[in-house]
Image (spheres, coloured by chain):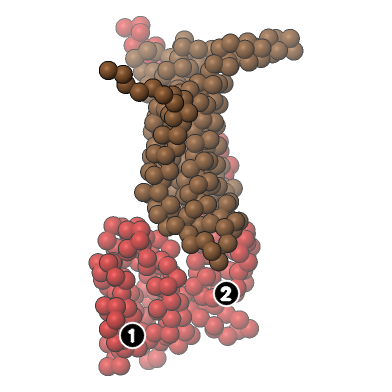
Chain colours: A brown, B red
Amino acid sequence: MSNSCGACVSLCGGKGKATFHDGIWKNNPIAVQVLGICSALAVTNRLANALVMGLALIFVCMGSNLIVSSLRKAIPHRIRMIAEVVIIATFVIVFDQILKAFYWDMSKQLGPYVGLIITNCIPMGRAEAFALQNGPSLSLLDGFANGLGYAAVLAVIGFIRELLGTGAILGHQVLSAEWYTPNQVMILAPGAFLVLGFLIALSQAIKAPVQEVKK
Amino acid sequence: MKNNVYTLVFAAVLGTVCAIVLAVPSVMLEPYRRANMEADKVRNILGVLGVPVEKNASSQQLLDSFRSVVKEEKRGTLSLYRYLQDGETMAVAVPFSGPGVWGPVEGFLSLSPDLRTIRGITFHKHEETPGLGGEIATESFRKRFIGKTLESVSGKAGIRIRPPGSPLADNEIHAITGATMTCNKVEVMLTAVIQRIKEERNENVK
């Protein structure tokens, strides 16, 4: 009991807090590092799709970070990347199988994008940059924070695209069809680029309001 | 040398462990996945046959209603799905497939019991360009087929897809603007299946 509390305190204060803040905001995988864009653009035409995809990435990042970190002293340096991919792929396939068995419609809508998390830069980047250097509990937190950072951006994009593109949120009509004409562009790929671009600009503006180049 | 052996052993162990971890859910979830795939196909057939289905029906419900009202039969090279209600055929669905512009196109054609008139059509699998060829899957395009005959007045089998605006015969429909290639491919695959339907029909008459 006291042990887990100790771990919790060390996670919540200092390094843990910084790790969490890094993943969610300061180094957000999408808004700052601009990783995982492919899926962020492809599956965000519906909020529900975006949420499930975010969930998948949280699951995969936490799992792969935990295992890679636990094995970090055992993994031979020369094959560490391929070992990371194998571990990531295992978690992705398990998630995909569960989706296919119990949420078939969702699985069909997400198409190949769940499987493509294997090649997503985020789990791989976290394993390589963080889990190999840090302990399991901190790595688990890092995986969670980065997954959540990705999921949050996807959720916002999904929310905006579904609302403007269909006038609905999670399938419930909120903008009446009587006065709102759904904007098809939002459902198609260009809408995703637009929303993501504005979102990144906004987050940059909040982070560094006046940082003009002075000559 | 020692290093290499360790690397190999590590790779082998990691690979084996991951394979086992993957095998468990794969085997356990297989029946669910198979039922879902089956239900997916069944949903398309029920839809095109016009069988009333609950909107949020589960895979099992779909399979049950399929088994109770649809009879599958083989006729030569064709497999037909017959929608029976009180022993009477309401409609017949025929699968068709063929190459599209970007990938294979698959669908079902629903026909009247005498196999002469189209009741409906679905394209459940296609990779055509969204917004152009992809429009074949929209209701507004699929509706154009309803009530069309399988052959022209002179008896030539096949559906013809004509440029928008042109006058239409009983076996002709209007194409989608900007999707000429897809429409041509659809015309070819439909004409092929209709040809086979016609042959089967003639055999049966004999």
The total number of labels drawn is 2
Residue A163, visible in the rendered structure: yes
- Assign a secondary structure to mark 2: loop
Q: Residue at x 46, y 17 (%)?
A: A130
- First in sequence, mark 1 or 2: give its number: 2
Q: Position of residue B135 (x, y in %)?
A: 37, 65
Residue B198: quarter of image: bottom left
Residue kind at label 1, given as amino acid type: Asn
Q: Which subunit holds the residue at mark 2?
A: B
Q: Which subunit holds the residue at mark 1?
A: B
Residue of label 2: B51
Residue B171: quarter of image: bottom left
Residue B79, visible in the rendered structure: no
Specify the farthest residue to the front.
A215
Q: Nearer the viewer, residue A176 or B35?
A: A176
* Quadrant of the rendering where the N terminus of chain A is positioned: top right
Left or right of A69 on screen, residue A5:
right
Q: Are marks 1 and 2 in contact (CB under 8 Å)?
A: no
Q: Nearer the viewer, residue B107 or B35?
A: B107
